[in-house]
Image (cartoon, helix red, strand yellow):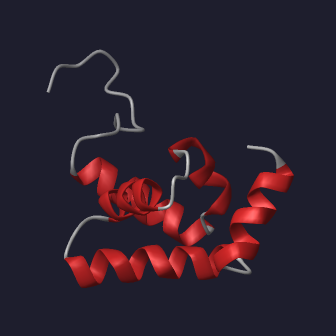
């Protein structure tokens, strides 16, 4: 995403990454959905490319997304099993 596009998105609704991230967390809590679903819904409703979202997220929300992703088995584990089968 171009810097100008990112600044336009933030200036339209939010002034910081934290404000955008708080909005996403609020959507997730109010609608009782995951953060990932809240982001997807927000992008659909606002004609925002999903690829643009990482530049808009606060570091704390990124960590929450990683945690949810691993809990839902959407991410590979970060540890190595040294060839052992689980």
* Residue for point 35% across, 65% down: 38
Q: Is residue 64 above or below residue 44?
A: below
44 or 58, which lies in front? 44
Query: Which quarter of the rendering shows the N terminus?
Result: top right
* Residue located farthest toward the left when viewing the structure as drawn: 86
Residue 53, horizontal then vertical, whole percent? 58, 54
Q: Is residue 16 above or below residue 7?
A: below
21 on left or right of 24: right
* Residue for point 71% across, 70% down: 10
Residue 68, horizontal then vertical, whole percent? 31, 58
* Residue for point 31% across, 26% down: 81
Residue 79, horizontal then vertical, whole percent? 39, 36
70 or 21, which lies in front? 21
* Residue for point 41% across, 54% down: 44
- Tell me where residue 35 sits by quadrant: bottom left
* Residue located farthest toward the right when viewing the structure as drawn: 4
- Tell me where residue 41 sits by quadrant: bottom left
58 or 83, which lies in front? 58
Residue 22, horizontal then vertical, whole percent? 51, 82
Query: Which quarter of the rendering shows the C terminus?
Result: top left
Task: Tally the numbered discs.
Answer: 0
């Amino acid at each position: 995403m171009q810097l100008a596009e990112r600044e336009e998105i933030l200036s339209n609704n939010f002034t910081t990454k934290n404000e955008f991230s708080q909005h996403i967390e609020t959507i997730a809590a109010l609608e009782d959905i995951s953060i990932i679903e809240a982001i997807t819904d927000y992008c659909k409703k606002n004609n925002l490319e999903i690829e643009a979202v990482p530049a808009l997220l606060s570091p704390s929300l990124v960590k929450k997304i990683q945690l949810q992703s691993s809990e839902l088995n959407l991410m590979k584990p970060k540890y190595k099993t040294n060839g052992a089968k689980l």
